[in-house]
Amino acid sequence: MAPSKVLAGARVVLPTGTVTDGRVIVDGPRIVGSAPDDADVLDLSGHWLVPGFVDIHNHGGGGASFTSGSVEDVLRGIHTHRLHGTTTLVASTVTGDMDGLAQRAGMLSELAEQGDLAGIHFEGPFISPCRKGAHSEALLRDPDPADVRKLVDAARGHAAMVTLATELPGGLDSVRLLAEHGVIAAIGHTDATYEQTQQAIDAGATVATHLFNAMPPLGHRAPGPIAALLEDERVTVELINDGTHLHPASLELAFHHAGAGRVALITDAMDAAGFGDGRYMLGPLEVEVADGVARLVEGGSIAGSTLTLDRAFRRAVTVDRLPVGDVVEAISAVPARLLGLDDRKGSLETGKDADLVVLDADFALKGVMRGGAWVVDPQLG
């Protein structure tokens, strides 16, 4: 067995605050409370040590799609995001035909059973044609509970979340069904009113899929879903902090009203994340990625992002000037809690999985550990 590791000298971000000149002890795949005399000691002075990132909304990366790629493709995409600090990842699909989505769920569930994925997120086809974004309108359908149940069953216990336009026929009943099965009902790609959104939350919806994007804007007479989602303490709001999807003032508004304890920073990444510009497919739709921004070839709608969570973290601290502890909560603790994994993930505490990220003084990623093993070894540069 590999010797225990002592990661010493860093500023360690804990749920209780930041410890200067702190240390984290790793034995096997876990964080432990003490180290033997023969433990390996790594001096991380001048660095930050934070929990591994948890991404609950991600369509791919490294040139690979979680929606259409092979098992090897999906694993390549997962590894790409691990290289950028995401140690726990939910694979998101996009709108497709029901049989194809069910088949895809079966394949992704096998990877979840192996521990490569933390679950499956179905984004579409139960969304509004008025707010479809980068989804094929021809394949959209109302959220009939029987269809929703078909996808949940196909995921074999690994359905983590379903995004719904809850104002559509069957929407509220589908929310109730998901809640009964322990699956997150997320409100997104929606044209709902303020009052309809409140009804969906009361029915059991607990997440806002990429708040602000693919929903009516905040209005002073018709506040729409944004106000309802921000004001309700039962709801966690996803935010894509890539500088394209959100103006910094919108990000600040969300953090101010919801607080870090109700924000989940996500990537909404597609194949080009960690890979580069070019032409890609997102489901059945062609996407052009230029200067790191993904847009549909036909129509020009933003088509996911090329974001990785290390960039989202760094931007949140250096551009948006958010406290480091708040960013750690939103990028690790909150999504881990949503997934029901907070007994093992999301914070640097004794007994939890040794999933962690090393950042330098400027918040650039220098190391990634998952389950006690280095994915990116800070000693190797």
Image (cartoon, helix red, strand yellow):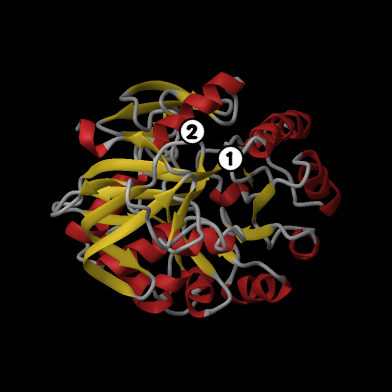
Does residue 212 appear in the picture of this structure? no
Which of these two is toward me, 233 or 43?
43
Relative depth, front residue between 370 and 295:
370
* Left or right of 367 on screen, residue 36: right
Residue where numbered disc 1 is placed: 117
Secondary structure beneath label 2:
helix
Q: Is residue 87 left or right of residue 179?
A: left
Please, what is the three-letter code of the amino acid marked with disc 2? Ile
Q: Amino acid at mark 1?
A: Leu
Q: Residue furthest front?
A: 37
Secondary structure at badge 1 equals loop
Q: On the picture, is 311 further left or further right than 1? A: left
Q: Which residue is mark 2?
A: 78
Residue 346: x and y, percent?
Answer: 46, 59
Residue 34: horizontal and vertical position, in percent?
A: 39, 61
Q: In the rendered view of the protein, which quadrant contains the C terminus?
A: top left
Name above or below for residue 194 compared with residue 186: below
Decide: is 193 above or below 124.
Answer: below
Residue placed most toward the observer, 212 or 325: 325
Q: How many marks?
A: 2
Q: Residue at x 54, y 50 (%)?
A: 131
Tell whether label 2 touches label 1 (CB within 8 Å).
Answer: yes
Give me the residue at 69% from left, 76% from top: 202
Q: Is residue 274 visible?
A: yes
Query: Residue at the location (24% across, 46% down)?
Result: 42
Q: Quadrant of residue 124?
A: top right
Task: Look at 44% across and 55% down and name the residue there.
Answer: 31
Circle 1 crowding by C-alpha within 10 Å: few under 14, some 14–19, many from 20: many
Image quadrant assignment for residue 190: bottom right
Q: Earlier in the sequence, mark 1 or mark 2?
A: 2
